[in-house]
Amino acid sequence: MKASIVACWPWRERRKGYCNLPFNWPSFLQLYPSSHPHCPRSLAIISPLPLLPISNQFSKNLISISFDAPFRNVLFSTTRNQQMANAWSAFLSIYSSSNLVIPTPPPGIYMHSLVSSPMLMDPNPPFFTTYKALLDSQPHSSDIDQTVIAEECELPIIDLNCLNGKHHEEQCKRDVKVAASEWGFFQVVNHGISNSILDRLREVQFDVFRQPFQKKASEKLLDFSPENYRWGTPRPTSLKQLSWSEAYHVPLPPSTDVTKASPRHIIEEFSTAMLRLAHQLVGILAEGLGGYDGTYIKENCTRNTCYLRLNRYPPCPVKTGVFGLIPHTDSSFLTIVRQDQVGGLQLMKDGRWITVKPNLDALIVNIGDLFQAWSNGVYKSVEHRVMSNPQLERFSVAYFLCPSYDTVIRSYAEPAIYTKFSFGEYKQQVQEDVRRTGHKVGLSRFLAQSA
Ligand SMILES: O=C(O)CCC(=O)C(=O)O
Ligand SMILES: [Fe+2]
């Protein structure tokens, strides 16, 4: 099949007016089928920002390229943080055999199809318009300046295959325990979640997040409801509270009859595999506390009490630094994350932010607040955040191992650092704190008197 892309230089908002940036194409090309009579197979419409400035200059930046499909996955995995020349030559080498044409497209026509409904087509939430006052009033937040590079590191990696061999099994379990108590974070490889299911879920993620924002916010799309759609931060009072991302919170109710290969089916298959993995890790972690088998957690965290979050982090061209996801701890027992190759996840270690180097073979596991409470502080629920990326969009999926709201969390040991609380009480307290102060206080709200 012949396909064509219409490309345009991305735009970045400056404090005064707009300027265009070097070309870095995978970051901003958004694919849509076009029904325009002059380019029936055109697939890309550009929407780097909702506030795309429309000017004469715009048409000069248009180019048109024809190439053979498939194009979809390549677009989002070729280059990372590279300048125009690199990105462009990577593109050319991939498609060198396909007749590349760079004619001047009929700009008027493209312009017309581009500008006639940019807002309706745009998949990105209206960050600029919604947070304009905040962005204008707080020109610089040095705390989250993108130029401050956090050290990149390999998290401890645990090869779960080792659990099958007698020789390494005990060492492997010890490694899990040490990572959970010293880092609160680790990676697992040979985790048993097949690439096929990970890829299919990623496709679903692409498909749903590529829909226009207006639709995501108002319609049921591919089994995803608008009630479960979130974006940005409800009422940020400073840039530090602003998350430049969108997400679907996916509850996992009892399985119904779902069509095979439907998004819901893929989600169910994925979450079943994730629950198995989470329970396996709980078993190891509980055993690490001295002979417990983790039955209490496993019995209370079942497939219907857990949930998934599909995250998308659109490129964030705000230079002054805005988070993709603000610093937080997870309220779960455990969270298992699959991140893509873009990177940006950081965690707090010994008082410093550390960037987790992406590893597509690994899943990232982090201890949540409930495990910290149950383990009486042995395992650490560590603060983490996602940095935004000025050029690249990023996807991740997080599986949260949680109990039902009426489950009571108490420490496995005495004297307990935290008072006992139900998960419902905990969530309510978190919500109240966020509403009142703009941030989560978390476990320190539940410290026992004597602690
Ligand atoms: O996107 C990521 O890498 C992390 C997401 C995360 O921390 C969360 O959803 O709680
Ligand atoms: Fe998180």
Image: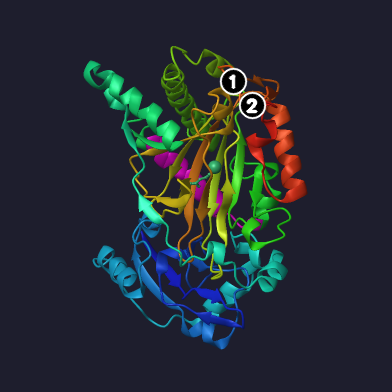
442 left or right, relative to 110: right
Q: Name the residue rendered at 60%, 44% in the picture.
A: 248
Q: Nearer the viewer, residue 190 or 8?
A: 190
Task: Please say whether residue 321 is visible from this viewpoint.
Answer: no
Q: Which amino acid does label 1 sit on?
A: Ser
Give the mark nearest the N terminus, 2 or 1: 1
Q: Which amino acid does label 2 sit on?
A: Tyr
Q: Is residue 423 above or below residue 381?
A: above
Give the extent of the magenta segment: 196-213
Q: Answer yes or no: do the residues labelled 2 and 1 have beta carbons within 8 Å?
A: yes
Q: Residue furthest bottom?
A: 56
207 in magenta: yes
Magenta-drawn stretch, dominant element (helix, strand or loop) = helix
Query: What residue would you read off at disc 2?
Result: 418
Does the beta carbon of the residue at mark 2 sit less than 8 Å from ligand 2?
Answer: no
127 left or right, relative to 282: right
Q: Nearer the viewer, residue 254 or 343?
A: 343
Task: Please say whether residue 158 is visible from this viewpoint.
Answer: yes
86 left or right, relative to 408: left
Residue 245 image position (x, y, % from top left): 58, 54
- In which quadrant will I find the N terminus? bottom left
Q: In this view, does 152 lie above or below 383?
A: below
- At numbered mark 1, what does the secondary structure look like: helix, strand or loop? loop
Q: Which of 133 and 237 is in front in this view?
A: 237
Residue 243 sits in quarter: bottom right
Q: Name the residue rendered at 27%, 24% in the picture.
A: 162
Q: Is residue 305 above or below residue 340?
A: above
- At numbered mark 2, what does the secondary structure look like: helix, strand or loop? loop
Query: What residue would you read off at disc 1?
Result: 411
Residue 403 sits in quarter: top right
Residue 251 image position (x, y, % from top left): 62, 33
Does the beta carbon of the residue at mark 1 sit less than 8 Å from ligand 2?
Answer: no
